[in-house]
Amino acid sequence: MKVKYFAWVRERVGKAEETIEPPGSVRTVEELIAWLSGQSEAHAYAFEKPKVIRAAIDRAHVKSDAVIAGAGEIAFFPPMTGG
């Protein structure tokens, strides 16, 4: 699956996107974040506060307990602000 990173998540990981193959035991967004955190120091830094990270599966915003099976793309980004 393709993973995309935005804003300071991208800056901390050091790349805008990558193609990954997480193990079958990784079933939710929350589990994917935990798995990604173990992939490198940069990933660990990007996901050091997983509760603030937002995610989208195939361009639809999802909660951390969303199932990732069948996802073509998962995006991670910090909380959005606006006005």
Image (cartoon, grey):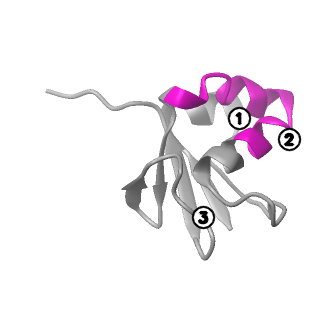
Q: Earlier in the sequence, mark 3 or mark 2?
A: 2
Identify the residue at image location x=60%, y=64%. 68
- Residue 70 image offset from top left, x and y in percent: 60, 76
In the displayed structure image, the side of residue 80 where residue 71 appears, left or right: right
Q: Is residue 4 above or below residue 40?
A: below
Q: Residue 61: which quarter of the image?
A: bottom left
- The kind of residue on which mark 2 rests is Gln
- Residue 11 image offset from top left, x and y in percent: 62, 29
Query: How many neighbours does mark 1 have within 10 angstroms: few (below 14), some (14-19), or many (20 or more)?
Result: few
Along the line of sight, which residue is nearer the eye, 24 or 1? 24
Boundaries of the magenta span = 34-51
Q: Nearer the viewer, mark 3 or mark 2?
A: 3
Question: Is 48 included in the stretch rendered in magenta?
Answer: yes
Identify the residue at image location x=76%, y=28%. 44
Query: How many neighbours does mark 3 have within 10 angstroms: few (below 14), some (14-19), or many (20 or more)?
Result: many
Along the line of sight, which residue is nearer the eye, 19 or 36? 36
- The kind of residue on which mark 1 rests is Gly
Identify the residue at image location x=67%, y=42%. 33
Along the line of sight, which residue is nearer the eye, 70 or 12? 70
Identify the residue at image location x=75%, y=34%. 43
Dots 3 and 2: beta carbons under 8 Å? no
* Residues at marks 3 and 2, CA–CA distance in whole angstroms: 18 Å
SS category of the residue bearing label 3: loop
Residue hosting label 1? 14
Dots 3 and 1: beta carbons under 8 Å? no
Which mark identifies residue 39? 2
Q: Earlier in the sequence, mark 3 or mark 1?
A: 1
Residue hosting label 3? 68
* Residues at marks 1 and 2, CA–CA distance in whole angstroms: 13 Å
* Residues at marks 3 and 1, CA–CA distance in whole angstroms: 23 Å
